[in-house]
Amino acid sequence: MEHRWSVRKPFRSTVTLVLPPWGRVQAEISDISLGGLAITSPHHAVPVNTMTILSFSLERDGRTSYHRLPAQVAHCDDTRIGFLFTEPGSETLHVLRDMLYPPAIKLSDAIAGQSVAA
């Protein structure tokens, strides 16, 4: 059973990692959450607890924001590597929160089938 404190959402984008001993490696993000992201395995076994830097972009309201975050390998198997953000920063957390959690609507509007005007 997985224990996580944030929803994980499928997400497709490219990330650049700095991984010893390979240096810079580009990979495909498979999902993302407030606490980290997972990539499809770049065909290298990476030991759990390895520290790295992740560089990737996120879209919000038609704008692109660029993020460069320290992270730690939390999981590695034949198909995926999971990273935990160690210092995500408030800007990254705001963008991820908006991306992962759409605005709530009033229960009465949901029952009535109405959408809420922003």
Image (cartoon, helix red, strand yellow):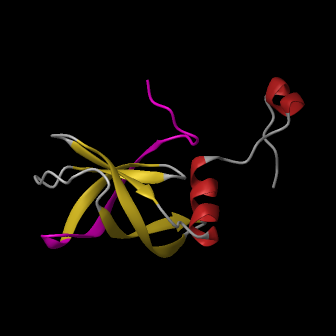
- In this rendering, is residue 77 above or below 64? above
Query: What residue is rendered at 55% in x and 40% in y?
Result: 7
- In this rendering, is residue 27 above or below 117? below
- In this rendering, is residue 50 above or below 111? below
Q: Is residue 5 highlighted in magenta?
A: yes
- In this rendering, is residue 108 above or below 15? above
Image mark count: 0
Residue 47: give x, y in percent of width and height.
22, 52
Residue 50: give x, y in percent of width and height.
28, 60
* Residue 63 in which image quadrant: bottom right
Residue 113: give x, y in percent of width and height.
79, 28
Task: Give the position of the C terminus as an image quadrant.
Answer: bottom right
**Residue segment shown in magenta:** 1-24
Q: Name, please, the residue furthest toward the right.
A: 108
Front one among 52 and 10: 52
Task: Give the position of the N terminus as an image quadrant.
Answer: top left
Q: Is residue 111 highlighted in magenta?
A: no
Instruction: Judge from the rendering whether residue 20 lies leftward or rightward of residue 12; answer left or right.
Output: left
Query: What residue is rendered at 64% in x and 46% in y?
Result: 101
Residue 19: give x, y in percent of width and height.
22, 68
Instruction: Judge from the rendering whether residue 53 lies leftward or rightward of residue 106; answer left or right.
Output: left
Query: What residue is rendered at 46% in x and 60% in y?
Result: 85
Query: What residue is rendered at 45% in x and 53% in y?
Result: 36
Instruction: Judge from the rendering whether residue 111 lies leftward or rightward of residue 32; answer left or right.
Output: right
